[in-house]
């Protein structure tokens, strides 16, 4: 399957930004700017913004995602949110294993895997984030790190479930730093991820998976990054908070 047949996906990761009313206002700005997009457009927003966000995008081509989800359906997990809670309000996607969760909140490949399986079982589409630290790249173990994350994060995920999985390659050193991986670096690792998927599943299954790049992608560099064979979209932090910049990236992915 060639790139043109894969679904291009541009997803904003708003992180801990925007109150519900601010979220509504930003989505109202984004909607008309991306209405003719020839790719999937998603805004992943803080939990408390989700209900307002889902309501605001009704009737548009913008979809809403959460930024995390717990693996248990319910119970004594103070502060956590379940897949059922997200599904009931109309959330379709969920970002899992973001490096900020791994760095600051003790997320491990084991918990990413539990969340991924729970999300898939509930009919949510996980955007599973993988990526190496700067030190790991300097030690020349990027491929080892990525191979391990892919294998563990997708452990026990079936070939059929894989159809609903999006992978985001996010080199940790490029997130929120203004340092973007070069288009060649992004392509090299996205291609490696696809090769790992082919090993774990098969080539056809791997060819169908949307692999995003994330890490300081913006309106200035999106064209080049998204032009690469194995870069099927973007997970966008900072630039997703500015409607025009986000829309420009969506436009680049629609070419
Ligand atoms: C992200 O949060 O996933 C991200 C890629 O952030 P930024 O675009 O700001 O680097």
Image: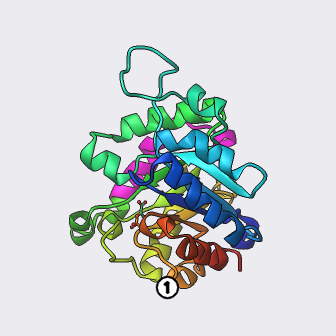
**Can residue 64 be seen in the rendering of this structure?**
yes
Above or below 142: residue 15? above
> Residue 232 falls in which quadrant of the image?
bottom right
| Residue position marked by numbered label 1 in the rendering | 220
Q: Residue at x 49, y 49 (%)?
A: 128
State how many labels appear.
1
Find the residue positioned furthest to the top.
Answer: 75
Q: Is residue 154 magenta?
A: yes
Mark 1 crowdedness (10 Å alpha carbons): few <14, some 14-19, many ≥20: few
Question: Which secondary structure lies at badge 1?
Answer: loop
Q: Residue at x 48, y 40 (%)?
A: 47
Residue 17 to residue 139: above or below? above
Viewer-proximal residue among 90 and 164: 90
In magenta, the rendered stretch is: 145-162
Compared with 51, 175 (above or below) is below
47 relative to 229 in the view: left or right? left
User: Which secondary structure dominates the residues rendered in magenta?
Assistant: helix
- Residue 161, given in percent of the width and then of the height, sits at 65, 40
> Percent x, y for residue 66?
52, 44
In the picture, measured across the screen, residue 85 lies left or right of residue 97, that is right
Q: Nearer the viewer, residue 169 or 74?
A: 74
Quadrant placement of the C terminus: bottom right
Q: Residue at x 25, y 67 (%)?
A: 134
Which residue does the image show at 40% across and 51% down from the upper left? 98
């Amino acid at each position: 399957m060639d790139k043109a047949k894969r679904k291009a996906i541009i997803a904003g990761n708003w992180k801990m930004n925007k109150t519900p009313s601010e979220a509504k206002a930003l989505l109202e700005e984004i909607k008309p700017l991306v209405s003719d997009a020839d790719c999937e457009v998603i805004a992943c927003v803080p939990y408390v913004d989700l209900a307002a966000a889902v309501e605001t995008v009704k009737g548009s081509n913008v979809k809403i995602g959460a930024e995390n989800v717990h693996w248990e359906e319910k119970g004594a997990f103070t502060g956590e949110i379940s897949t059922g809670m997200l599904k009931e309000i109309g959330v379709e996607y969920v970002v899992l294993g973001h490096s900020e969760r791994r760095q600051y909140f003790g997320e491990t490949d084991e918990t990413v895997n539990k969340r991924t399986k729970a999300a898939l079982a509930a009919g949510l589409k996980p955007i599973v984030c993988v990526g190496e630290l700067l030190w790991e790249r300097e030690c020349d173990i990027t491929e080892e790190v990525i191979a391990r994350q892919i294998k563990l994060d997708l452990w026990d995920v079936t070939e059929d479930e894989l159809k609903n999985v999006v992978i985001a390659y996010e080199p940790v050193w490029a997130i929120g730093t203004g340092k973007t991986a070069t288009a060649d670096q992004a392509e090299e690792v996205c291609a490696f991820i696809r090769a790992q998927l082919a090993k774990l599943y098969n080539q056809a299954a791997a060819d169908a998976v949307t692999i995003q790049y994330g890490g300081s992608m913006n309106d200035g560099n999106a064209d080049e990054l998204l032009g690469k064979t194995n870069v099927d979209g973007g997970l966008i932090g900072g630039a997703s908070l500015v409607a025009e910049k986000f829309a420009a990236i969506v436009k680049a992915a629609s070419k």
